[in-house]
Amino acid sequence: MKKLLYLIPLSFFLAAVSCEGDAKKKTEEVKQPTVLAKFAGIKNNDQFVIGNDLIVRVQLKDMENLESLKLFLNDQTVYEGKPNSDMHVSTIKTDSLPVGYTSLRLIAKYKGSSDAIGDSRKIVFFSNKVPEMKVAKIVKKYPHESTSYTQGLEFDGEQLWEGTGQRGRSIVAKVDLNTGKITEQIDMEKTLFGEGITIMGDKVYQLTWQAGRCLVYDKGIMQKVNEFNYSGEGWGLANNGESLIMTDGSSKIVFRDPETFEVQKTIYAFDHSKEWQYLNEIEWIEGKIYANVYQRTDILVIDPETGKVETVIDAYDADRELKLDNPKSDVLNGIAYKKSTKEIYITGKYFPYLAKINLAEDLP
């Protein structure tokens, strides 16, 4: 009786192994579904250079029932038709494409199927030009409130405006350029961390860092009149007279509708070899986007159509001079453009000085 009790579990074990083997065999016999249309030779995050032809290959099956094939780059149709070969090849010109992250998609339609076959890749384009190098030279220094954690800086006519950060101390303010003194200010809610500002018409827009709120003020009465919500972080803000332009600390630059805050388009800051992350305070200057890079003394000049970094401005010496006399000085941040005189001004977080600069060639 004792021996029989030991034999019963063993028989169950052998039966279980046998069933498991049968199940595995049946699974192996099940054929995987046939992929009718897919990209061949291009993987996610493959890198390309603007100006070089993009060769796209699509592997196709069941050609007799294939009705049409469409290829898209960022939702723009770059091929539409019925291929003659089961390895379709498209050559795409890239001269006018933006740099950065690009969506490559295909849609194939087959007879007897109501569902389209799709495939997609995320690819990356770099600029075909090396950025020009320039140096920021201080023309004139002005005092600046060293208690201001500068997040946004902008002229409205002759009036300088500044937005500051830190919870409990974030403000939007009118500043006297010559004295550096705040003449009027709007205090943010104490829980909010203020970020970039910009002025369009009679409205002042101010981002928040992590609260996902853009506050809108009437600049005449210095009171909040509206508010928008967005996902992600807010860093820098500017405008081109038609759209709000926003950064979030990545390489991404988003254009938004000033009336609804809806996204209009997105570009990415890339040069010939690098993705520029940590874009911070920005300014629209003569048709270009000027951008601070967080914790760097580089100022970028970016093409708003393509995202190409056209110029890198070395502001190392200016940064060192403007943060003198205050050991609490943090990082360069704040670009303002005075249209009437075509002058550029810069400062930084807790900097005791603000400066008018000019740009000189970076000679070897």
Image (cartoon, rainbow, N blue to C red):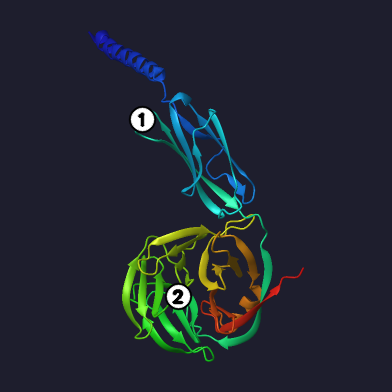
Image quadrant where residue 168 sits = bottom left
Q: In which quadrant is the N terminus drawn?
A: top left
Can you give x and y, in whole percent of width and height, for residue 248 in the image?
A: 46, 63
- What residue is drawn where x is 51% and y is 79%? 350
Q: CA distance from mark 1 to mark 2?
A: 51 Å
Q: Nearer the viewer, residue 245 or 229?
A: 245
Looking at the image, residue 242 lies above or below residue 267: below
Specify the label residue 113 is tagged with.
Answer: 1
Q: In which quadrant is the C terminus drawn?
A: bottom right
Residue 331 visible, this orientation: no
At label 1, which amino acid type do we have? Ser
Residue 261 visible, this orientation: yes
Disc 2 crowd rating (10 Å Cα; few below 14, some 14-19, many 20+) is many
Specify the label residue 69 is tagged with.
Answer: none
Question: For the residues carrying marks 1 and 2, which lies nearer the camera in this image?
Answer: 1
At label 2, which amino acid type do we have? Thr
Can you give x and y, in whole percent of width and height, for residue 137 in the image?
A: 67, 79
Residue that carries the numbered disc 2 in the rendered image? 198
Which mark is first along the chain, 2 or 1? 1
Helix, strand or loop for disc 2: strand
- What residue is drawn where x is 60% and y is 83%? 356
Image quadrant where residue 183 sits = bottom left
Can you give x and y, in whole percent of width and height, for residue 276 in the image?
A: 57, 60
